[in-house]
Image: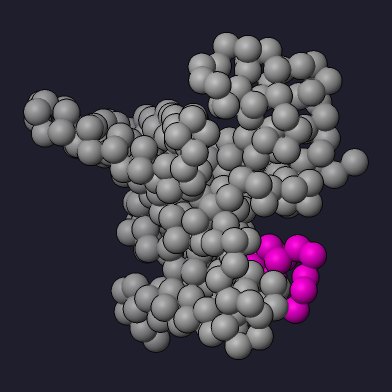
Amino acid sequence: MPLGSALHHLLNRFSILEIIGGWMPGDVFPAFFEMEMLQRALIASVLVTVVAGLYGTYLMLRNLSLIGDGLAHVSFGGVAVGVTVGAVAPLSYALGFSIVASIIIYELQSREIVTGDTSIAIFLTGMLAFGLVVLRLFSQGITTDIEGYLFGSLVLVDTYSLNLITWISFIALLGLALFHRALLAITVDHVAARMQGIPVHAVGLWFSITVATIVVSMVQVIGALLVTALLVTPAATAQLVSRSFRGSLLWTQVFGLSSTFIGLYLSAELNTGSGSMIALVAATIFALVGMLRFANTHIKPFDSSQ
């Protein structure tokens, strides 16, 4: 049985979601814990939030916040091609496009062919434009399904998508468990890490490819144009209150999951888009924490060396 379906079956077998749903407020929101289609969406949302928060923390420390946004736009180009050729699973095209783009971006930056975020900006605008042109020339343009990929649509999370998201999340978590020490060493000081014998280029390439797959897994939940809301905003909020790297990882989960659940609740009850509402809640939490941080200047700044 595919991993995502197995997880869904396990949660339903012990009625875990239904029990939690009985305590949930609202008229519509409890349906996420009761209806099979919305249960898939809820599971996918939680998985991508957890994984995005972990990797987003490393992206913040490495000053690569824009790479998620860039790869999300690349994934939209892949989705556009998949929709145009009539693919049953356009996300598979997005996955291929994003992985190739992540490798090229990493090599351009590591070899200093281009500096800073130039390569990300080129791919961001170029692939978004490519996707829009392909849709206009060979398909029906911006349809409701395409809008779902742009801004997020939990209705698009079918069994195949849940399985893909679950596998990506599992592999990403396993990779982080294996390489987190090397990744942190490279993040703090890549020169010292190389002197210690850590394969800096290989670990960096793995990280870039993994981020690309995570971004693709997020597209249906948050939308290609709003990926940064879960990949960067909770991590940025956590750094306002954390005094250590470990604390930042924990607070990122708190802010990320809070944004997701509150966003899903408000979008269900107010009948708004899930992706846009999650993004708005994440930004609001950042603003509130930022104001509190400003008012309590005695809080020590984030220290990545701890």
Bounds of the magenta span?
85-95
Q: Position of residue 163 (x, y in %)?
A: 76, 47
Any part of residue 53 in sight: no
Q: Position of residue 285 (x, y in %)?
A: 30, 34
> Residue sitting at 31 percent across and 74 percent down?
116
- Residue 94 part of the magenta-drawn span: yes
Q: Looking at the image, which is closer to me, 271 or 100?
A: 271
> Residue sitting at 83 percent across and 20 percent down?
13
- Which of the colour schemes (rainbow, by chain, secondary structure, one colour) is used? one colour
Q: Position of residue 134 (x, y in %)?
A: 59, 84
Q: Quadrant of the C terminus?
A: top left
Q: Quadrant of the N terminus?
A: top right
Any part of residue 232 in sight: yes
> Residue sitting at 57 percent across and 26 percent down?
28
Which of the 4 image quarters holds residue 10? top right
Which of the 4 image quarters holds residue 138? bottom right
Where 195 falls versus 221 (above or below)?
below
Where 58 falls versus 19 (above or below)?
below
- Residue 202 part of the magenta-drawn span: no
Q: Looking at the image, which is closer to me, 269 or 226?
A: 269
Q: Position of residue 154 (x, y in %)?
A: 61, 45
Where 59 falls versus 236 (above or below)?
below
